[in-house]
Image (cartoon, rainbow, N blue to C red):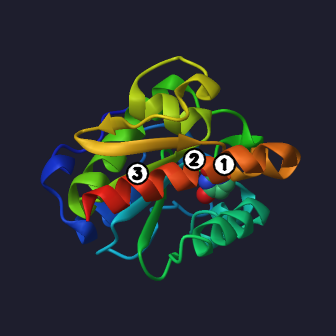
Amino acid sequence: MRQRMPGVTEMDWDALGQSVAACRACRLCEGRTNTVFGVGDLQADWMVIGEAPGENEDLQGEPFVGQAGKLLDNMLAALAIGRRKGVYIANVLKCRPPGNRNPLPEEIAQCEPFLRRQVELLQPKIILAMGRFAVQTLLQTTEPLGRLRGRVHRYHDVPVVVTYHPAYLLRNLPDKAKAWADLCLAQEVMRKLS
Ligand code: URA
């Protein structure tokens, strides 16, 4: 692993985006077409955090643009929010793991400071963590996702609600009802805050 430039913790959105685009801190940079920084409303109350770019995201440079992204957009629409207004979407990893393999711990360790700064800059009122890697990274735990659902956690003081990854839901349709319950919990947290 090579060292990344210092200073991420002080960067503004532009500098952070440039730093991600230039990042060569792990070997994922060698296979990428684009880095995938994040997309959405910089004034958003909601932040969605996924795992890592897939093939379509790597090609387009935007998170959740494939089939899983369509499902995510529909889930967000049910909450009357979307990537243009009300929500900001990012991943734990900003580069695609080859063949969509699972992120490695050292890749997560190198990339997480970018995510942490995104959260600091956005200051969301709630984070929806989607899928095992996002959940376990944010909550610093190895507990299975199923045991973490249904209650409110914290990531650097921001409330976190965990739910299944949309790609998983596409393969496990019956669990969509559980994901809907998770979204309702997140909405309830937001309602109490306002
Ligand atoms: N899966 C993710 O976790 N993130 C994306 O951007 C696309 C698929």
Secondary structure at numbered mark 2: helix
Q: Residue at x 44, y 70 (%)?
A: 87
Q: Amino acid at mark 1?
A: Ala
Residue nearest the viewer, comparing 154 with 2 = 154
The reply to whether discs 2 and 1 touch (Cβ–Cβ < 8 Å) is: yes
Q: Residue at x 53, y 35 (%)?
A: 150
Question: Is 133 above or below relative to 147?
Answer: below
Q: Residue at x 26, y 65 (%)?
A: 194
Secondary structure at numbered mark 1: helix
**Quarter containing the N terminus:** top left
Q: Amino acid at mark 3?
A: Ile
Q: Quadrant of residue 101?
A: top right
Mark 3 against mark 1, which lies toward the viewer? 1
**Sooner in the amino-acid sequence: mark 2 or mark 3:** 3
Mark 2 against mark 3, which lies toward the viewer? 2
What percent of the width, then of the height, locates residue 16? 28, 61
Residue nearest the viewer, comparing 4 with 45 = 45
Question: Is 107 above or below relative to 115?
Answer: above
Residue bearing the label numbered 1: 179
Residue nearest the viewer, comparing 193 with 1 = 193
Residue 182 - label? 2
Left or right: 92 as drawn, with respect to 110: right
Residue bearing the label numbered 3: 127
What percent of the width, then of the height, locates residue 130? 57, 46
